[in-house]
Image (cartoon, rainbow, N blue to C red):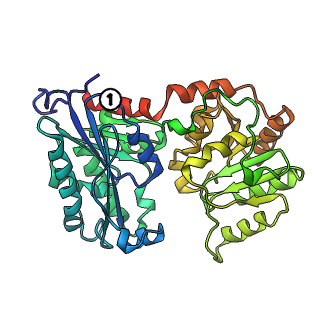
Amino acid sequence: MDVTLARRTGGSSAAGGRIALAVADANWFTTANLFGEVSRDGVSTLLLSCLDYRNAWRRGQRPWSWGGPLRPTGPRHWRRELVLPSGWMKRFPRLGMRPIARAVRGWRRGLGAGSPLALVMTYPYYLYLRDQVRPERSVYFNLDDYTLFWPSQAEEVRALERRAVLESDLTVCVSRLRAEELRAAVPEAAGRIRHLPHGAPSAMVAETPWHRPAPPPDDMAGLPRPLLGYVGSLEDRVDWPLLTRLADEFPQASVVLIGRPPLPGSEGWADDYRRCVSRPNVHVLGWRPQEALAGYFRAFDVNLIPYLVDHPFNRMSSPTKIMDVMGSGRPLVSTDLPECRLYTHLFDVAADADSFVAAVRAIVDGGSDDDRASARHDHANRNTCADVSGRLLDWLAE
């Protein structure tokens, strides 16, 4: 089905039912997975990966590989990587956005006439890019409370975000709580603010639900079951005392942590982390590539979202692990995060540490099956990244 964009001001078709969809940016797996699976006829998609020199270096990129040409990544899909000077987004956005704007304009010209531009902005600062490329449609795609990213510039971020919500045709929030906050903060645009939970990446959706754990990857093959697994950043957002208690309550189990260990530090949470990983049945496997994660989710007896409920990032977050795990069908136990409460019919959301341990124990005692594998798998199949991106396009067409 072709998508027709009507200009909000005139109500007429923007052009022939075709869209050039540019996503600024797709550095996170969240946006790369969602917009990388856009599959609508007539929609051409450009994923922009924009980094500064410092972050590119931290990600293992070296100067001789920075940037690069426009690369086709699939039917009607392209990707463009740009590495820009430090400060390009916050200190010098008008200058910093110019190379990105040139990349967008060049890509759009290559599509030929008749493709109106829709720009997806994942940060408020991309308003400066919008002003340079002048799209027919714009979407503010909110992933977090960005004042927590840049606390020293919180007032500037709030002002820019207010403009982004007011001036965009559509605001999409992956977290329901964040959508409610923005509706309260910008009531004039409340009707254009939508909650859109993450989709399930196709690589995470098994052909059939795993009612019992799958055979483990080689690096877990020698660990005693049950395997209680967490996949994610090993940082201050994790409830390390809770994981320590879990390891103590299940001494026969293996608590498996997949993610980069934190850098050495003296913060209190780092002490809690070291105390947790010192347990003999806690195993830190390190970072694993995105394409390998499905094998871990499917092999765990219980998947874990052990986030601190009072951490500001966690309150506003929509954990990607929700849909990643549901695609496998495997059981999941989470702490009491606002977004997770939307899925209490599909997995356990524990009110406190006692309830968390009890939920894990009930699943393990039940043979690592909580009788909801098919329901989770069905939900993931109905909410793939292709499905979710399609909903966004439908809303934009309105």
* Left or right: residue 304 compared with residue 338: right
Q: Which residue in the structure is indicated by mark 1?
A: 40
Q: Position of residue 338 (x, y in %)?
A: 57, 42
The kind of residue tagged 1 is Arg
| Residue 272 falls in image quadrant | bottom right
Q: Position of residue 14 (x, y in %)?
A: 14, 31
Q: Residues within 10 Å of mark 1 (few under 14, many from 20)?
A: some
SS for tag 1? Answer: loop
> As displayed, is residue 150 above or below residue 185?
below
Q: How many marks are shown on the rendered structure? A: 1
**Residue at coordinates 67% horizontally, 46% vertically from top-left?**
296
> As displayed, is residue 152 above or below residue 392?
below
Image quarter of the N terminus: top left
Image quarter of the C terminus: top left
Q: Position of residue 352 (x, y in %)?
A: 73, 46
**Residue at coordinates 43% horizontally, 36% vertically from top-left?**
196
Residue 144 shows in this picture? yes
* Left or right: residue 293 compared with residue 333: left
Residue 335 shows in this picture? no
State the residue in front, 170 or 151. 170
**Residue at coordinates 56% horizontally, 27% vertically from top-left?**
379
* Left or right: residue 235 compared with residue 186: right
* Left or right: residue 63 compared with residue 246: left
State the residue in front, 298 or 97. 298
State the residue in front, 16 or 142. 16
| Residue 342 falls in image quadrant | top right
Q: Position of residue 54 (x, y in %)?
A: 40, 73
**Residue at coordinates 35% horizontally, 51% vertically from top-left?**
122
State the residue in front, 197 or 85. 85
| Residue 90 falls in image quadrant | bottom left
